[in-house]
Every structure is written in structure tokens, then in C-alpha cells.
Image: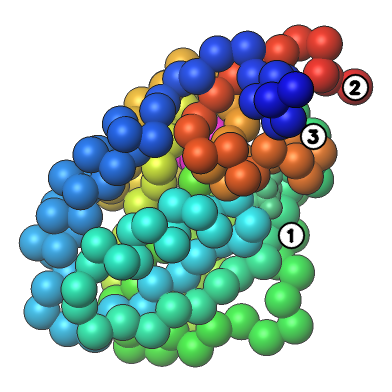
Amino acid sequence: SDGMHRDVEKILITEEEIRMRLDVLAQKVLIDFADEEIVVVILLKGALVFAADMCRRLPVPMTVECLNVASYHGDIKSSGKVEFLDAKLPEVGGKKVLVLDDILDTGLTMRAVIDRLGELGAREVRGCVLLNKLKVRDVECEADYKAFDIEDEFVIGYGLDYRGRFRNLPYVGVMKSEVIE
Ligand code: PRP
Ligand code: MG
């Protein structure tokens, strides 16, 4: 059989579309971040794949930090609470920070992270997401950079999971309904 692909109902964004769009997005980010060393903050685990592809398109001096945050716990709906799971948070005092995440949905995660990095003394924090869900957010939050706008439906692949699976799909897709437990 075709392994994980058989659980995919349809492909929303192909590998090729992601590649082409990230080239353009990186150019936009570079215009704003070319002048000084930056800290890139990757939100685990969803942003892993996106971040690997984005970092390599940003040829500027940077350090990379990871933040382990979670609110969905593998489910299709947000728990409404963002947990910071790291014992030690990155040192961003006085720094210009670019936060990378896979998707902006309710806005809770990005809002909480931007606020926390501000509390840690970051001089400027900007958010960059692969997917921007077109919906009314639960909290006020928009990303400064976004690759794709999508409808409000549950998506998997390219870092996004359902119950921990499907992060390794090379494209963004919609799962077959019978996969939902
Ligand atoms: C998902 C996703 C984003 C966030 C977006 O993370 O990766 O980080 O939720 O949703 P929001 O805008 O409603 O907050 P999740 O908590 O599922 O953890 P994961 O990244 O480890 O999959
Ligand atoms: Mg996440």
C-alpha cells in the first residue's frame, strides 16, 4: 500500500507550491532582518519542517532556539491553554527575534510566545507562519509573515500532526474522516 498517503483525503498544498512560496517569503523576511544578528525561535514540534526549510533560505547571522509549547496535545481542537514545557527559556534580551510556527489558528500559541519573549527582554519579536487560518481568532494575533492562507479545516503534513502522526508528509493535506478517532 502507499503507507501514510492512504489516509490523506486531498492534498491542499503541494511540495512544489511550498518550495516556491518559501522562496518569496524568505525574501520578505530578509528585507526586515538583514541588518543585524537575529534569534530564530522554532516552536516544537509543528514548526520543525517549516523551520528547517526557512532557516536555510535566510543567509544572515542567526542563532537558533527551540521552544517546546503545546496546546492541542495531538487532538483536532485547541485545549485553550498554552503550556511552556522547557525548564529553561532562551536568552533573547535585547535581541531581534523571528518566531517560526507551522500554523496560526486560534492565535493562542503565537500570542503567548510573543508575549513571553517580550517579558524575557526581546527588543523586537515578529511571527512567521506557514499557514494562516482565515477565521476570527480567540485572541488578538496576526503573523507578520505568512506563506499561505487556508480555510478553517483540520490539516496535516509538513510538520502538522494528528495524534503525533503525519508530520513527515512532504505536503499539506486533509485527512480522511474515517482516520479520526
Ligand atoms: C499547534 C500548531 C501551532 C498551534 C496553532 O501546536 O503547531 O503551534 O497549535 O494553534 P493556535 O493558533 O490555536 O494556538 P500543538 O499545540 O498542536 O503542538 P505541536 O506543535 O507539538 O503539534
Ligand atoms: Mg505547535
Determine the secondary structure under disc 2. Answer: loop
Q: Give residue 106's position: percent from left, percent from top.
A: 57, 34
Mark 3 CB within 8 Å of ligand 1: yes
Nearest to the eye among marks 1 and 3: give it.
3
Residue positioned 59% across, 26% down in the render: 155
Q: Give residue 15's position: percent from left, percent from top.
A: 39, 35
**Residue under label 1:** 83
Judge by depth and name the residue closer to the eye, 72 or 20: 20
10 Å crowding of disc 1: few (<14), some (14-19), many (20+): some
Type of the residue with mark 1 = Glu
What is the quadrant of the N terminus in the image?
A: top right
**Residue under label 3:** 75
Q: On screen, 68 above or below 75?
A: below
User: Given contact means CB atoms under 8 Å apart, are the residues at marks 1 and 3 in contact?
Assistant: no
Nearest to the eye among marks 2 and 3: give it.
2
Q: Give residue 24's position: percent from left, percent from top.
A: 16, 45
Question: Which of the two labelled residues, at mark 1 and mark 3, occupies the earlier sequence position?
Answer: 3
Question: Is 25 placed left or right of 110 in the picture?
Answer: left
Type of the residue with mark 2 = Glu
